[in-house]
Image: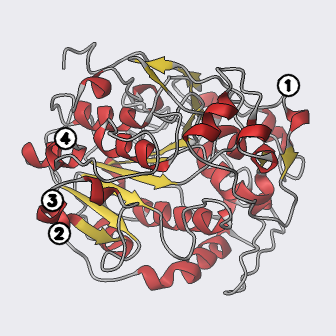
Amino acid sequence: MRRAVVILIISLFLITLISPAVSAQASSQTRTPIKHVIAVLFENHTFDNFFGIYPYDNASWNESMIRSMTVPENLIGTGHLSQLRAVPNGVYSTPDPVEGYTAYHLDWNHGKMNNFVNGSGPQSMEYYTSYQLGLEWSIASEYAIADRYFAPQLSESAPNTLYYIAGFSPVINDYGPPPSFPMSETIFGELSHYGISWNIYVQNNTTGNFDNMQHYISNWNQYSGHLLSWSDLISEAQNNSLPAVSYVFSEGPPGFSQAPPSNVEKGEIWLAYLINEIEESPSWNSTAIFITYDDPGGFYDQVDPPMMDGVQLGMRLPMILVSPFAKEDYVSNTVMTHTSIIAFIDYNWEIPALNKFVSLSKIPLDMFDFSMPYKNGCVARPPIDLQSEQHLPPNLHLSIDPKVIDYNFSGTFPFVPQYSYGVLPYPREGASNVTLSSLHY
């Protein structure tokens, strides 16, 4: 079976998402070759819950390749793995841990990271493997991931998502509004002020919203025309009419967000579909896709989150960068949070920092390589042909039932590297201390 089967699965699963385009033009004034930032937000997972044993997988078709891959700070060899339970093969979801400000502070236990069972419950101690996330692991290995990306608040969805769009939160838990604040204090308001195009994308813009965050924006109705559908995003990419900045929210009734107790493969397939469509579009050569999760959801993570400008950050979250300029098989140790994505936007379009917290947030510049070419003379990485036979193991068998999600993508991991690790012109692990403040923004 070949990569075309994966694409067929993704296409069949999401065929209803295609619809006519809505045009927008991106600003051409950027500091880097990136003209389009696409920020994709999933929900409720920690780094260790998704990447706790990455890249190790005894079921892989190519264990020798895995042994040559860059290893993030995971659970292997730490002594913590014995406390946890792997989600069994054939199971694609877990019960929902207890969430909230109080539960997460109990989990954290003043940095001891040893009270999750009492705080978020025994279900917090489960972690996924390539049996469920082989496709997402492969996407991460082809591009760059971060192992020091923290939730901006030691709390749940609302405050963390508000940091994601505004760089601050007036609430510490899932309540409100009130309080609310004006659009001018969000990244969207800043982009509008400087004439930089943007849109927000949800599954169905006629019935959906972006995680209820619009209710916190006092004058959102003036900007509601910027709320479009996922299918609009795909059409814009295909027509080379993407805005400069796209915020994509995965929340929707069918459970694409990966939040428990949803089937994580549903969101994984949707993500692969989105990436495939962008890579096959004219927009690919100038795009950066940041993929992350709103909050830890109560799942275990071993790393004590640091303080930032007097704010106690929350547990580590998964973050993947997909771009023609993303370093291959790269692990970033840069301490980041949601405001690091805002900081990259401000940096790239050379506009002032949205606020002080954003100005102090480290920018994920180490995850990019803008100093090509490779030894083959390529200035930027071409798209990965997801239908190419070379990326699939031999004798891979996949099937689809429209009513049941049970694909077992373990056999797809790892994809064959796009470039041999030996020819890469950069180290495959590192960090950056660059902030807008250090650049006097």
Mark 4 lies on residue: 185
Amino acid at circle 3: Gln
- Look at the numbered disc 1 and give the secondary structure of its residue: loop
Tags 3 and 4 in contact by the CB under 8 Å rule? no
Across and down, in percent, residue 133 comes to 71, 56
Task: For the N terminus, give its image quadrant.
Answer: bottom right
Residue 296 lies in what quarter of the image?
top right
Q: Nearest the camera: 406 or 383? A: 406
The local crowd at label 4, few if under 14, some if 14 to 19, many if 20 or more residues have their Cα within 10 Å, is some
4 or 1: mark nearer the eye: 4
Q: Residues within 10 Å of mark 2 (few under 14, many from 20)?
A: few
Q: CA distance from mark 3 to mark 4?
A: 23 Å
Which type of secondary structure does the marked residue at label 2 adopt?
Answer: helix
First in sequence: mark 4 vs mark 1: 1
Distance, label 3 to label 2, CA atoms, is 15 Å
- Judge whether 397 appears above or below 298 on screen: below
The mark that comes first in sequence, 3 or 4, is 3
Mark 3 or 2, nearer chain start: 3
Is label 3 or label 1 in front?
1
- The amino acid marked with disc number 4 is Glu
Residue 167 appears in the picture as rendered: yes
Along the line of sight, the residue nearer the viewer: 123 or 4: 123
- The earlier-in-sequence mark between 4 and 2 is 4
Q: Nearer the viewer, mark 2 or mark 1?
A: 2
The numbered mark at residue 225 is 2
Residue at 85 percent of width and 49 percent of height:
86
Identify the secondary structure beneath mark 4.
helix
Q: CA distance from mark 3 to mark 1?
A: 49 Å
Report the mark closest to the observer, 4 or 2: 4
Location of mark 1 (residue): 77
The image shows residue 160, relative to residue 214, as above or below, that is: above
Q: Residue at x 84, y 69 (%)?
A: 395
